[in-house]
Every structure is written in structure tokens, then in C-alpha cells.
Amino acid sequence: MILVRYINREFFIGISMIMLGLISLFAFFDFIQEIGDLGKGSYGILQAITYVILSIPGHIYEVVPLAVLIGSMYTIGQLSYNSELNVIRASGYSIKKIAISLMYVGVIFSFFTIIIGDLIAPHSEKNAQQIKIGSTNSSVSQEFSSGFWIKDGNNFVNIENVLPDSSLEQIHIYEFDESFNLRTIINAKKGSFEKGEWKLKDIKQTILNNDSVMTKTIAAGSWKSLMRPEMMNALIISPQKMSSINLLKFINYLKKNNQKSTKYEVALWEKLIHPLMPLVMIIFAIPFGFLQERSGGKFFKMFVGIIVGIIYQILNTMIRHLSLLNDWQPFISSLVPTLIFLSIGIFLINKFEYK
């Protein structure tokens, strides 16, 4: 049991160090990118730092599998280089038993992934986008039960619902003149951004004159506004960074309205499979400790982990896009890369076990 705790502690420290390094790198690049937006509106250094900090949980969620892979490669390389793997095996631990023993640290990072991905990252990402968009463009308020309120020039816009694709439902536009007298009220059931302007449908327009009120109904019309779909991203986040519950709600909504939900179903499956990746990456990394144990050392194996991690990201992205293009079953894009890495890991463990 002491040996198991020692191995898990070494792997936990190695993985945590790699994760800290990757997150610091991502945060640094984020801050460099934000420097170009400083001075736009009220977006200053404090807002940029806040934005970067709030973006960190999203990065943590994304890099956990990569950190586990590289950290495991580094740790197993270190144990191999110091001949500790030989001592562990001489103590009666087979490669399979070592892999099973490391499931403790794998489960820790799996639960960590769930907590970050479903409870922390969605809210922090949303707040980060709200801070940036609110500071650089119009001020957006989400504190009313009636929906979102946006100031657009001299006009005020109320949007009751924003869908994940940035299309709008139940839009209410209150147009004021230069003296801030209410002149026109426009109510539209739906709105979408096409060719540089908003296309509204099922419009009811009320025109207020000094001594009369005129109402007319219009099937469809254009609304020219400074507001862009990017502003809607301050109120919603990408499917990959949404919580599982919100993804499920959006999928049900789209299906009830006969809209394509493949993109969000793929994101949901990725959300369900993602917490298993720390376990898979540990299984994949273990055999490399027994591959040319003295050759290259821990840094060579860490380099191999980086290359394999890049391959995993490319494979995962490629299969995701192929799934969307070919309308495959949503679980394929998430399950296939995981099964490939798991199969390779199990194959190598069995190969070196009986070598």
C-alpha cells in the first residue's frame, strides 16, 4: 500500500506541474492577445486581467487530458531513468498491477474534470465574455426576468431569448428621437443575422405621433443595428464550454422545434467522455516506461507525450468535423479517439508484460 501511495503521489505531482505550466502558458498568450483590445471603450488593464483569470477554468478543462498524458510520460520516464520501475517490478508488481494502482490518481483528475467542466468553467467563461463585450461595446444587462436589455445608440432593445446559434426570439425595439421621446415600438418574433444585418420575422410595428398611434404588421424586414452576433456570445458560450444540463436543454429545444441538433449532441457526448480521458491517458502512458528504459530519459518521454497529445487533438478535431459533415452518430466523434488510445495502451501493456 505504501508503494501504491508513492507511485500515485509521484504521478499526481508530475501531472500537476505540467498542468500548471500549460495553464500559465495559455494565460500568458491570452493576455498578449488582449493587449490589442486595451483602450476600446472602458476595456483597460484590470478588465483584461479579469478576463484572462476567468478564462482559466475553461483552459483547465481542455488541457486536463494533455496534462495527464505529458505528466504521466514525464513521471514514468523519471521512474524508469532512476531504475525505480525495476525495483517496483521486483517487488511483485506487474505492469498491469502498476496501471491498476494508478487508477486512483486517474479518478482524482476525472472528478476534477467534471467539477471544472460542469460547475465552474461555464459560468466563468460566460462572465469573461460579458466583461469583455460589455467593456468594449454596448452595455448588456441580464438581471431582468424579461430577458436581455441592450442599448443600441438612442434605442433600447429587449431580447427575451438568445439561442446557441445567436439567433433571437421575441425582440422588442424601442426607438427614441434625439430628445429621447419614444417614437416607434417594433416587436418581432424571430431574428437572425444575415449578410451584415438582422432579418426579423413576424413584425408588429407601432408608430407614435404627437396626436395619433398607428400599428401595422409586416411579415419580414431588415433591422440595421450596431449589434452583432459576437455580442450574443457575451450571453451564451460555445457548446464545448456549456454545462451538460444546458446542453441537454438546448438539444431538447432544437428537437422540439425540428432544428438540427447534431453539433450540440456531439458536444454533449464529448462532455460525457471527457472525464474518462485521464484514465485512458494514464493507461496509454504506462508502457512507455518499459520502452528502452535508459534511452532518452524522462525528457524524451515527455517530448513523446507532447507529440502524442498533439496527434490526439488533431484526431479528435478531425473526427468531430467529419461527424458533423457526414451526419454520423454523435457519440462517434467522442468515442473513437478514446477507444483508439485505450486500445493502443492495453495492447502495449500486454506486449511488455509478457516480453
Image (cartoon, rainbow, N blue to C red):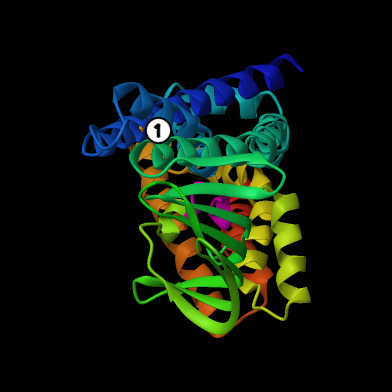
Q: Residue 85 location in percent, x, y? A: 55, 28
Residue type, numbered disc 1:
Leu
Q: Does 233 sit left or right of 217 as displayed?
A: left
Q: Which residues fall within the magenta stretch?
A: 232-241
Q: Is residue 340 above or below residue 85?
A: below
Q: Residue 277 location in percent, x, y? A: 62, 47
Front in this rendered view, residue 345 or 39: 39
Front in this rendered view, residue 229 or 106: 229
Q: Is residue 110 above or below residue 48?
A: below
Question: How many circles with numbers are drawn on the protein?
Answer: 1
Q: Is residue 17 above or below residue 131?
A: above
Front in this rendered view, residue 307 or 331: 331
The residue located at (66%, 53%) in the rendering is: 271
Please name the residue that numbered disc 1 is placed on: 22
Point out the image quarter for the N terminus.
top right
**Crowding near the residue tagged with mark 1, few <14, some 14–19, many ≥20 C-alpha atoms within 10 Å:** some
Q: Does 318 sit left or right of 41 as displayed?
A: right
Q: Secondary structure at mark 1?
A: helix
Picture quadrant where residue 136 is located:
top left
Magenta residues, dominant SS class = loop
Magenta segment: does it hold 82? no
Residue furthest top in the image: 2
The residue located at (67%, 47%) in the rendering is: 243
The residue located at (59%, 79%) in the rendering is: 216
Question: Does residue 325 show up?
Answer: yes
Question: Does residue 242 show up?
Answer: no
Q: Residue 149 location in percent, x, y? A: 56, 47
Front in this rendered view, residue 54 or 232: 232
Q: Residue 224 location in percent, x, y? A: 38, 68
Picture quadrant where residue 249 is located:
bottom right
Q: Is residue 339 above or below residue 105?
A: below
Residue furthest front in the image: 211
